[in-house]
Amino acid sequence: MTTYKELKGTNIQAVSSDPSNPIEGQVWYNTTSNVTKGQAATTAGAWSSGGNLNTGRRAFGGAGTQTSALAFGGTDAPGITGKTESYDGTSWTEGNDLNQIRRDIRGAGASNTAVLAWGGNTPPPAYTAETETWNGTNWTEVNDLNTARGYGARAGTYTACLAVAGFSTPPPTQQAIVEQWNGTNWTEIADLNSNRYELAGGGTTTSALAYGGEENSGKTESWNGSAWTEVNDLNTGRNFLSGDGASNTSNIAFGGGPPNTGKTETWNGTNWTEENDMSSVRGQGAGAGTTTAAVAFGGEGPGGTSAATEEWNGAGAGVTRTFTDS
């Protein structure tokens, strides 16, 4: 008879606390709770509650990962803010403010210690080209965008990213402009096929996706490093949505409106697939992550400006199961 150790290379361990990073198929007995547990992979994605922002807000920027995210700028109860908060996967901590308060700002970064933020709407209002970098402690002003704008989409990291489309004035104009950041300067590259704003995106400077936007658009465009190509639309067209992803073959879109929604869709390189909805409907929020591990925070819901945070664990993500007699 084959034993568990022969199958998995380890005995079932007796431990006082659950392992911090269990592998799929690992089984252990928790002597504190007196239960047997095992690590499995999820078969369908779902949202769960995370720690609330210290300041609820909408129309702001977000970047990072599910366990290392940054929220910055936006509109809170008093008005436009430069407040910055850092998420560690459990709770949010306030840090130093942006140098320029603004809403409708966008940003990119791989963690809460390395983020680039650009554009947005500043009092009285006016759209700005200002760009700032975050090092985990302070924001530093760097070289501006070539075209001042807000409500755009992003892809990449703080040293190599894309600022995609958006809205500028005067005159009021929906943009198709795309600019690439090389760590020092912005350079205009190939435009989107359609002008739009209030859209979302994710990926890298050579493999990105842009989707949604005015007016409740489901349009999706894929970037290969040299040109944008129209591909299949979102199942639910919307603006004011959030999203992120690793490439033009893997992205997640969530929230948006009007009307505000909790709908979530994942992209596999060909089609969008509807997934489980967020617990709270909202638009004008922010988020970061991948199709297997993302985080959504803030926004505007039925009760007004939100501080709620939700964490997405997609199909294939690890999950700890408790064995019972039933």
Image: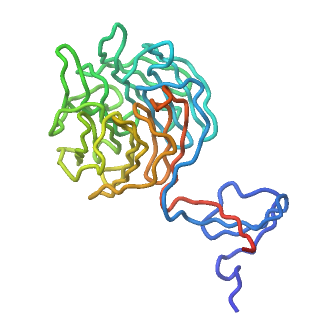
In the displayed structure, does residue 131 sit left or right of residue 14? left
For the question of whether residue 113 can be seen, the reply is yes
Quadrant of the frame with the N terminus: bottom right
Q: Residue at x 45, y 21 (%)?
A: 73
**Quarter of the image where one finds residue 100:** top left
In the figure, 236 relative to 30: above or below?
A: above
x, y percent for residue 154 = 34, 35
Residue 312, position in %: x, y? 51, 49
294 sits to left or right of 241: right
Please say which color scheme the image uses.
Answer: rainbow
Query: Which image quarter: residue 35?
Result: bottom right
In the picture, measured across the screen, residue 30 lies left or right of residue 123, that is right
Residue that protrudes farthest toward the bottom in the picture: 1
Count all numbered tags in the image, as a single digit: 0
Percent coordinates x, y for residue 305 in the rendering: 49, 26
Residue at coordinates 37% horizontally, 45% vertically from top-left?
A: 253
Q: Residue 72: x percent and y percent?
A: 48, 25
Give the quadrant of the C terminus.
bottom right
Q: As displayed, is residue 15 above or below residue 54?
A: below
Q: Residue at x 25, y 44 (%)?
A: 218
Residue 285 in the figure: left or right of residue 279: left
Q: Can residue 223 be seen in this view?
A: no
User: Does residue 63 lie above or below 33 as drawn?
Assistant: above
Q: Which residue is drawn at 36% across and 21% down?
A: 131
- Point out the residue furthest to the left here: 193
